[in-house]
Every structure is written in C-alpha cells, then in structure tokens.
Image (spheres, helix red, strand yellow):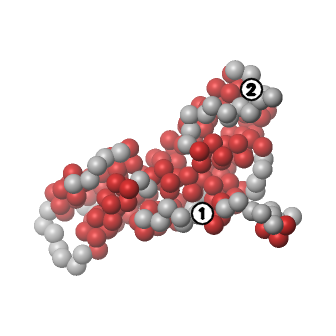
Amino acid sequence: MSDGPFKNLRLTKRWRKFTEAAYNDAFDQIEYCAMASDAVVQDALTDSVRALVSALNSYVTQNQMDIDPLSSLERIFNEHSKDQFADTLQREMRFHLSEKCLPGEALEQALAASVDDQINIARNRIQEECIHSSEIGQMRQDQLDRTIERANSAFESLDRQSICEAIIAGNKQAFKGAVAKKDGLEEGPSL
C-alpha cells in the first residue's frame, strides 16, 4: 500500500495538505484558497517577522515627520533577525522609498510584493514536487495537470489584501476557522 505521491514532499505540513487536497479534488475553490492563505500566513509570520512588522507598523503610523525614513527603516530591519520573507520585505521597502513613496505606502506595497513572492515560492515548489512525482511514476500526466491547474487556480484567487492584513495584525489564526476540520453533517461541504 502506498501513501500516495506526496508522502515525501519537501513542503511544510500545510502545503502538503493543500497539494494532497488539490490532487484528490477534495474541496471547492473557497476551501483551497483558505488552505493556501493559511499556509502563506503560517510560513511568513514567524516570531521574528511578527516583531519586525509590528515595529515597522509602529514607525509608519507615528505622527512625527522623519527627515530620513530610509535610515530609520534600515535601523528597524537591522534590529530584527532576518529570514527570506524579511529580506524581501526590506528590499521592497527600499525600492518603494527610493520611488518617493511615504513610509506607510511603502510598507503596504512592500508587504504586498513580499506576499506575492511567498506565494510564487510555494507555487514553484508545489509544481516541482508534482513534476518529480510524475517523473518517478507516482502520478499520471493527467493527474499532474489537474493538480497543478487546481493549485494555480487557488493561487490566482487568493485574497492578498486579507493575507497582508493578517500579517500586519500578527494574526496567525486569521484563516484557522476556514481550514478547521469539519466533524458533523451540518459542517460538511455545501452541496
């Protein structure tokens, strides 16, 4: 007996569940989007990123005018540990500030770009793993095509603004209710 083509995926638990659901056509589009949104927030919102975003948000919402916002923001980034999401956020903040955006606008745009980057990383990793499963014979070509199509459709339908709001609020639980396990007959999928 096999555990299916996703037994040994190099994906986080949430992305593995999302990919298995897409492979099995287990949910509707809304639930795929909720699963993907939850996975993006969980991946991006580490403790260090939560502290960093909180510090950035405090800085951009202060009522005091800053002569050199780039230096102030660089100081905030240097005070926090870095990961891939934080590096992308810092690079995007620098870019938007150099384009003469206000710090608040720069944070919004940088966060949106960082979320897009996180989504693209997950999309690419899922596609690579599906292709690998197909190459070693664990998935037929039609299954590969359907799985990638469902995953891509969910990625395109994500409410990026809600994901950004969850990250700014530091709310890892923002999409938990939508992905919670359903037990009773009344809680099942809509027919």
Location of residue 62 by image quarter:
bottom left
Quadrant housing the N terminus: top right
The residue that disc 1 covers is: 176
Taking depth in this image into account, of 187 and 168 the one nearest to the observer is: 187
Asked whether the viewer can see residue 156, the reply is no
Residue at (38, 44) in percent of width and height: 84
Quadrant housing the C terminus: bottom right
Residue at (77, 34) in percent of width and height: 143
Asked whether the viewer can see residue 51, the reply is yes
- The dot on residue 138 is 2
| Left-right relation of 162 to 127 | left
Mark 1, Cα crowd under 10 Å, few <14 / some 14-19 / many 20+, is some
Q: Is label 1 or label 2 in front?
A: 1
Residue at (52, 48) in percent of width and height: 119
Mark 2, Cα crowd under 10 Å, few <14 / some 14-19 / many 20+, is some
Q: Secondary structure at mark 2?
A: loop
* Residue type of the residue flagged with mark 2: Gln
Image label count: 2
* Residue type of the residue flagged with mark 1: Lys
Residue at (55, 42) in percent of width and height: 12
**Distance from label 1 to label 2 (Cα)?**
31 Å
| Left-right relation of 160 to 59 | right
- The dot on residue 165 is none
Return the residue found at the far top: 136
Location of residue 128 by image quarter:
top right
Q: Position of residue 156 (x, y in %)?
A: 61, 52
